[in-house]
Image (cartoon, rainbow, N blue to C red):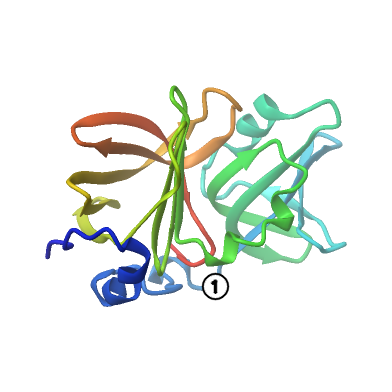
Amino acid sequence: MRVARSLVLVALLPLFAACQLFDGPRQSASHVGQTRMQGQLTAADGKLVFQPCNQSSSFVVNDTGGTSVLQEAATLADNQGKLFADVRGRIDGNRLDLQQLYRVERSGTACDDPNFKLLILRAAGQTPPWSVKVSGKGMVIDRAGQPPLALPYVEEQLGDGRFNLSTEANDQRIELWVAPQRCVDATTGAVQHMSAELRLNGQVQRGCGYFGGARDD
């Protein structure tokens, strides 16, 4: 299905909601019994400790999924040894059996992000700076020196966890290609679980991405 060109982009967004496969949180069968959590990572007594956002409880991290979170945290840790992490795993007593690492970064405000639960996907890159935020209502593309561009989109699954989002508007062909692959932001050092390519009229800009709270993969 091709998205019709239109100058009235925002008004079209509800019309294309049914065309999108991202229609709300969904859980893979492999994630049964696991919970996605965001919080703070701290090194203590030679161990990595995870404290969920806005909670007083903390859990010793057991990297059962082979995510290399210990190495990632050691590389990124600031002087206080504190990091923000977005993870999936199973709580067992005072232990977090970690299965998947979505992202780890230096941040003191990520726990307070009001848009996280509404996001399906966020991707961003540098040189030049760009970002794409995807929700159930459409995608918003921000580029250096350009006003934000709100667009409907269509998703195509490509296998092996890869997919692309595409749209055509105002005589432009825009695609976001995403693949499950460890990706490091060259500017901040943040580690995310997907690589991303933004393609605008044949020009390719590379970056990293992660699923927001509205997609439970």
Q: Quadrant of residue 206?
A: top left
The quadrant the N terminus occupies is bottom left
Name the residue that disc number 1 marks: 33
The residue tagged with tag 1: helix, strand or loop?
Answer: loop
Q: Is residue 46 left or right of residue 24?
A: right
Report the quarter where the C terminus lies: bottom left
Identity, as a three-letter code, of the amino acid under mark 1: Gly
Residue plotted at (32% across, 36% down): 197
Residue 60 location, x and y as percent? 76, 51
Residue plotted at (42% across, 73% down): 26
Q: Above or below — where is 132 with respect to 203?
A: below
164 left or right of 55? left
* Rendered position, 207 above or below 62: above
* Residue in view at x 19 percent, y 45 percent: 173
- Is residue 35 something that shows in the picture? no
Which of the 4 image quadrants contains residue 56? bottom right
